[in-house]
C-alpha cells in the first residue's frame, strides 16, 4: 500500500510582494534619520530601538556601525506608497537573539582589533542592554518568563533591571577609567559621557516626541470629525427631515438638488455659505440655487472653463438669472438647462426650456424684462443676447460677452 500523500502549506504571494520581500525596505512610519533602522526592525520583528542602539554600539568598534549603516542605506529602498506591507510585531525572543548576535559580533571585532577599548565598549554595551530593557515594547510570548512577568509588576521589573544594568555600566566605566587613566583623557571621557546620554535618554526623547506628534494628529482628526458632524447635522440631516415631511415631489427634488450642490461645494472647498462669489462658476451656482429655491423649478447647470467674476462676467450672470426666472415663471416647464462656456475671447451662456414658448411681437410694451434686464444689460457690457422662441416650441436664450484681457 502506498504511503499517504501529505498536504503541505502553500504560500501564495503576488509578484509585488515577492519583490518587496527580497529587498530591504525602509520604514514609512518609524523614522529618525532615513528609516533604515525602522525597516530592519520591521523585517526582523524586533523593536527598531534595538537596531538603532546596535548601530551606536558598533560605532564604538572602530566605526563599524557607521559603515554598516551606510551599507544599509545603499542597499535599502523607499517603500512603495501603493503597497501596504504589514510589519511584524516586536518579539522578545527575536530581541534576545539580536542582542546575542550583537554580543558575538563585538567579540569578533575585539579579536580583530577594531576596538575602542574594554573600558568604553563593555560599559556602553551594559548601558545599551539596560536601555533596551527600559524602552522596548517586545512580547515574550508564552514562555515561563512571560508567565512570571504577567504575575508580577512588569513595569517595576523593567525599571529595576534596566536601571541596574545602566548603573553597572557606569560604575564599570568609572572603575576601568580610573585604573587605565581614561578619565584623565578629557576628549575620550566627554565622548563616553555623550554616548551614555544618547543611549539612555535618546530613546525616551524620541518616543516622547513621537507621542506628541501622534497626539497632535489625533487631536486634528477629532476636530475634523467634529466639524464634519456639525456640518452634516446642520445641512444634510435637516434637509432629509424636510424631505420626509414633504409630499410634493418637485419640492423634494429641489431640496435634494440644493443640498447636493451645497455639500459638493463644501467638500471641494469652492465656497461656503455667506461668502461672496469670486469666480464665474461660483456665481452661477448661487443664482441656480436661488432660482430653484424661490421658483421650485429644476435647473440643469453646466459650466465649462474658468473665469474670474469681473464686470462683464457679472453682467452675464445677471442676464442668465433673469432668463432663468422668466423660464421658471412663464414657460411651464419643470426643468430648465443652463450651459456656460468660457472661451479665450468671450463667454457664452445658453438658457433653454421645453415650455410653451411665446411670440415676441405679442409681448406688451410695458414688459421690459427681456429688453432691459437681458438685451440692454449685455449691450452695455459689449455683448449681445439672442432670443429664439415660438409658441409651443420652447425658448432658447443665447448670451455672449467679451472677455477682458488678462
Image: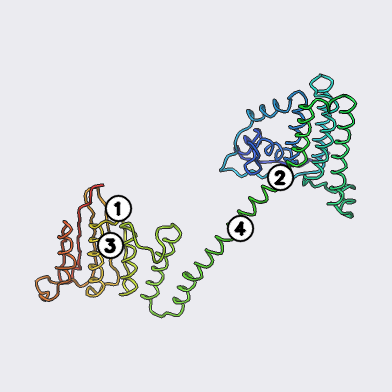
**Mark 1 and mark 2: Cα distance apart in space:** 52 Å
SS for dot 3 = strand
Circles 3, 1 touching at the beta carbon (< 8 Å): no
Image quarter (top left, top right, bottom left or bottom right) of the N terminus: top right
**SS state under label 4:** helix
**Residue under numbered circle 4:** 219
Q: CA distance from mark 4 to mark 2?
A: 21 Å
Location of residue 376 with respect to 249 vertically, above or below: above
Image height of 112 relative to 204, above or below: above
Residue 79 at what x, y percent from top left? 60, 38
Q: Position of residue 328 (x, y in %)?
A: 26, 72
Residue under pointer 3: 338
- Decide which of 37, 134 is in the foreground and name it: 134
Disc 4 + disc 3, Cβ < 8 Å:
no
Q: Which residue is mark 2?
A: 205
Q: Secondary structure at mark 1?
A: loop
Asked if the residue at tag 2 contacts the one at tag 3, i.e. Cβ–Cβ closer than 8 Å, the answer is no
Confirm or deny contact between disc 4 and disc 1 (CB under 8 A). Answer: no
- Whether residues under marks 4 and 2 lie with C-beta atoms below 8 angstroms apart, the answer is no
Image coords of residue 183 (percent x, y): 83, 28
As measured in the structure, the alpha-carbon distance from the residue carrying label 3 to the one carrying label 1 is 17 Å
* Residue underneath mark 1: 307
Label located before the other in sequence (4 or 3): 4
In the rendered structure, the answer to whether residue 314 lies left or right of residue 168 reads left
Q: Residue at x 48, y 76 (%)?
A: 241
Q: Tell which residue pokes out farthest to the top in this image.
A: 112
Question: Of the residues under marks 4 and 1, which one precedes in the sequence?
Answer: 4
Amino acid at each position: 500500500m502506498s504511503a499517504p500523500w501529505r498536504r503541505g502549506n502553500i504560500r501564495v504571494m503576488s509578484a509585488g510582494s515577492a519583490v518587496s520581500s527580497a529587498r530591504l525596505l525602509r520604514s514609512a512610519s518609524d523614522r529618525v534619520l532615513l528609516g533604515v533602522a525602522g525597516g530592519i526592525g520591521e523585517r526582523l520583528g524586533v523593536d527598531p530601538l534595538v537596531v538603532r542602539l546596535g548601530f551606536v554600539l558598533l560605532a564604538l568598534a572602530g566605526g563599524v556601525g557607521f559603515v554598516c549603516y551606510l551599507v544599509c542605506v545603499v542597499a535599502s529602498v523607499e517603500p512603495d506608497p501603493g503597497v501596504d506591507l504589514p510589519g511584524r510585531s516586536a518579539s522578545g525572543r527575536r530581541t534576545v537573539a539580536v542582542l546575542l548576535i550583537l554580543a558575538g559580533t563585538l567579540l569578533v571585532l575585539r579579536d580583530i582589533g577594531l576596538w575602542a577599548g574594554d573600558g568604553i565598549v563593555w560599559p556602553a554595551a551594559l548601558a545599551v542592554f539596560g536601555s533596551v530593557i527600559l524602552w522596548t515594547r517586545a512580547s515574550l510570548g508564552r514562555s515561563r518568563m512571560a508567565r512570571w512577568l504577567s504575575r508580577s509588576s512588569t513595569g517595576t521589573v523593567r525599571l529595576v533591571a534596566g536601571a541596574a544594568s545602566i548603573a553597572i555600566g557606569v560604575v564599570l566605566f568609572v572603575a576601568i577609567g580610573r585604573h587605565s587613566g581614561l578619565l584623565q583623557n578629557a576628549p575620550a571621557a566627554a565622548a563616553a559621557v555623550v554616548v551614555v546620554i544618547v543611549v539612555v535618554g535618546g530613546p525616551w526623547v524620541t518616543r516622547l516626541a513621537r507621542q506628541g506628534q501622534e497626539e497632535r494628529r489625533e487631536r486634528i482628526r477629532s476636530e475634523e470629525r467634529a466639524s464634519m458632524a456639525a456640518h452634516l447635522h446642520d445641512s444634510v440631516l435637516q434637509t432629509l427631515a424636510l424631505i420626509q415631511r414633504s409630499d410634493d415631489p418637485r419640492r423634494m427634488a429641489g431640496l435634494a438638488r440644493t443640498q447636493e450642490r451645497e455639500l459638493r461645494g463644501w467638500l471641494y472647498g469652492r465656497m461656503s455659505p455667506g461668502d461672496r462669489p469670486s469666480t464665474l462658476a461660483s456665481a452661477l451656482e448661487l443664482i441656480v440655487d436661488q432660482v430653484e429655491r424661490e421658483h421650485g423649478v429644476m435647473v440643469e447647470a453646466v459650466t465649462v472653463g474658468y473665469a474670474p467674476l469681473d464686470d462683464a462676467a457679472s453682467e452675464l450672470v445677471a442676464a442668465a438669472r433673469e432668463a432663468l426666472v422668466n423660464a421658471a415663471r412663464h414657460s411651464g416647464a419643470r426643468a430648465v438647462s443652463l450651459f456656460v462656456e468660457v472661451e479665450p475671447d468671450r463667454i457664452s451662456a445658453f438658457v433653454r426650456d421645453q415650455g410653451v414658448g411665446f411670440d415676441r411681437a405679442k409681448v406688451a410694451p410695458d414688459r421690459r424684462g427681456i429688453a432691459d434686464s437681458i438685451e440692454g444689460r449685455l449691450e452695455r457690457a459689449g455683448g449681445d443676447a439672442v432670443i429664439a422662441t415660438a409658441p409651443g416650441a420652447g425658448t432658447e436664450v443665447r448670451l455672449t460677452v467679451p472677455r477682458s484681457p488678462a
